[in-house]
Amino acid sequence: MPRINNKHMATYKKRGFKPKTKEEKEHYVEEHSTTAEVFNTLDEKATKTEEWVVKNQKYIFSVIGIIALVVLGYLGYNEFVQKPKQTEAMNEMFQAKKYFNDALTGTEKDSLFNLALNGGEGKYGMIDIAKEYGNTKAGNLAKYYAGMSYLHMRDYEKAVSYLSDFSSDEDILSTSAKGAIGDAFAQLNQMDDALDYYKQAANMSDNEFTAPTYLYKAGTVALELGKAKEALELFNKIKEKYASSTEATNIDVLIGKAEVMASK
C-alpha cells in the first residue's frame, strides 16, 4: 500500500478534512473500514452477551439469591445462635473452671478434678460442655481442661483424646496442650510419640519458658531411645539459645553424655 508522508497524516487528522489525492482517499477508506469493523465486532459481542443474560436471567437471579441467603444465614446463625451459645457455655464453665483451679492448689485433687470434669452445683462439667458446646470457643477450651484434668488423674489415654481434639491460636495454650500429650505418651511408655510431641511443643513458641522445657524433655527421651545425635542437637539448642534458662544449668553434663553415646 502506498505510504502517506507525515504532512499528509497531520492534515488528514484535522477535523473536517476531505481527502483529495488518491493516496489520501485510499488511506481514509481503509482506516474508517477498520474502525467500523472493530465497532461492529464489539456490538455483536455486546448483543450476544445481552441475549445470554436475558436467556439465563432466571438462573442468574437464582444464584444471586442463593448467595444472599447463605450470607444472611451465616450472619444470622452467628448473631442469634452462636453468640448466645458461647455466652451460655462460658456461664456453665465458670464453676467447672473454679474446680479445676482449686484442684491445682488444693489437697483433694482427684475429687476436685472429678468435679471439674463432671460438674457440680447444678452446672455442667468440662465433659458436658465440650459435648454440648463443642462448636463454640468455650466448648473447645473445655476439651483442653478436660484433657489436663485426666492427665493429673493419670488417665493418660483420655488425656490424649481430649487434648488432641483441642485447637487454639494462642501460643501458650496450644504449646501446653502439645507438651501435655507428650507427657501422657511418656507415661504410657510410648516414647517415640512422646518425643514427637515434645519437639512439636518446643517448636511452637520461641520463648524462654516453654521452649527450653520441651527441648529438655525431648532430649532426655531421645537419649532413652538411643537417638544420641538427635539428643545432642536438642541439648545444644538449649545451650546456644536459652543459656539463661533453668534447663541450661546442667546442660553440659547431658551434652557430654550424648557425645559419648553418639561416638560409639
Image: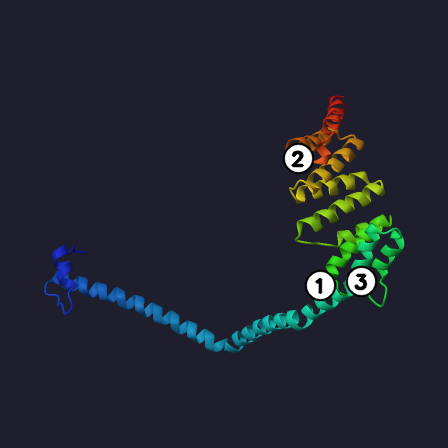
Q: Quadrant of residue 48?
A: bottom left
Residue closest to the eye, 17 or 118? 118
Q: Is residue 230 above or below residue 209?
A: above
Residue closest to the eye, 53 or 241? 241
Q: Could you tell me if residue 5 is visible in this image?
A: no
Q: Quadrant of residue 244?
A: top right
Q: Quadrant of the N terminus?
A: bottom left
Give the mark nearest the N terminus, 2 or 1.
1
Numbered label attached to residue 136: 1
Give the mark nearest the N terminus, 3 or 2.
3
- The location of residue 172, given as percent across then percent down, is 69, 49
- The location of residue 81, given as percent across then percent down, is 69, 71
**Label 2 crowd bin: few (<14), some (14–19), many (20+), radius 10 Å:** some
Give the mark nearest the N terminus, 1 or 3.
3
Amino acid found under the numbered disc labelled 2: Tyr
Amino acid found under the numbered disc labelled 1: Thr
**What distance separates the C-alpha of mark 2 from that of mark 1?**
37 Å
- Secondary structure at badge 3 equals helix
- The location of residue 92, given as percent across then percent down, is 78, 65
Residue that carries the numbered disc 3 in the rendered image? 95
Amino acid found under the numbered disc labelled 3: Gln
- Secondary structure at badge 2 equals loop
Q: Could you tell me if residue 8 is visible in this image?
A: yes
Numbered label attached to residue 242: 2
**What distance separates the C-alpha of mark 3 from that of mark 2?**
38 Å
